Amino acid sequence: MHRQRVLHRRKLPQPGRSPDHASGLARYANRFEVGYNAFEFLFNFAQDYDDGGFAHSRIVTVPAYAKVFLGVLHRSIVDYEAQFGQIPLPPGVPGVDS
């Protein structure tokens, strides 16, 4: 797996290796919601299926780091598509530009 990280930040500890981490488990998400106000961005991650779903994680950060996240995610998608080809979008996904 390729990982992007912000180079000016210190290396983060691995999940589960610090008392600050509640769990070392990875979570699958196929639904994303973003909210914001003047001071912070809120990213909600959920599992959504035909028979229901549930939100399981929320990340709250300041606008500057939301913008850093956008850049890291964009660079990762560009690199992925250069290596593996264009990512097809699921049909009927609202609010996504191709």
Image: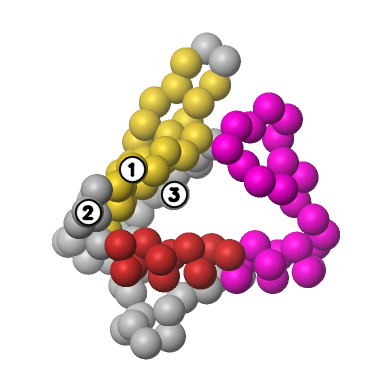
* Distance from the alpha carbon under mark 1 to that under mark 2: 11 Å
**Mark 3 or mark 2, which has the lower sequence index?**
3
| Tag 3 residue | 26
Mark 2 is on which residue type?
Ala
Closer to the camera in the image, 3 or 74: 74
Q: Residue under label 1, please give it.
A: 35
Q: Is residue 4 above or below residue 30?
A: below
Residue 2 inside the magenta-drawn segment: no
Stretch in magenta: 75-98
Q: Is residue 43 left or right of residue 74?
A: left
Could you tell me how many numbered marks the image carries?
A: 3
Residue 19 appears at what percent x and percent y? 17, 61
Q: Amino acid at mark 1?
A: Gly
Residue 82 among those drawn in magenta: yes
Residue at horizontal 32 percent and vertical 69 percent from the top: 64
Q: Residues within 10 Å of mark 1 (few under 14, many from 20)?
A: few
As drawn, the label of residue 38 is: 2
Residue type at the position of mark 3: Ala
Element on which disc 2 rests: loop
Left or right of 87? Residue 76 is: left
Residue extending farthest top:
51
**Toward the viewer: 57 or 93?**
93
Q: Tell which tag, 1 or 2, sits nearer the viewer.
A: 2
Q: Is residue 64 above or below residue 89?
A: below
Chain-order first, disc 1 or disc 3:
3
Q: Nearer the viewer, residue 18 or 7?
A: 7
Pointer 1 with pointer 3, Cβ within 8 A = no
Tell me the CA gap for discs 1 and 3: 23 Å
Q: Nearer the viewer, mark 3 or mark 2?
A: 2
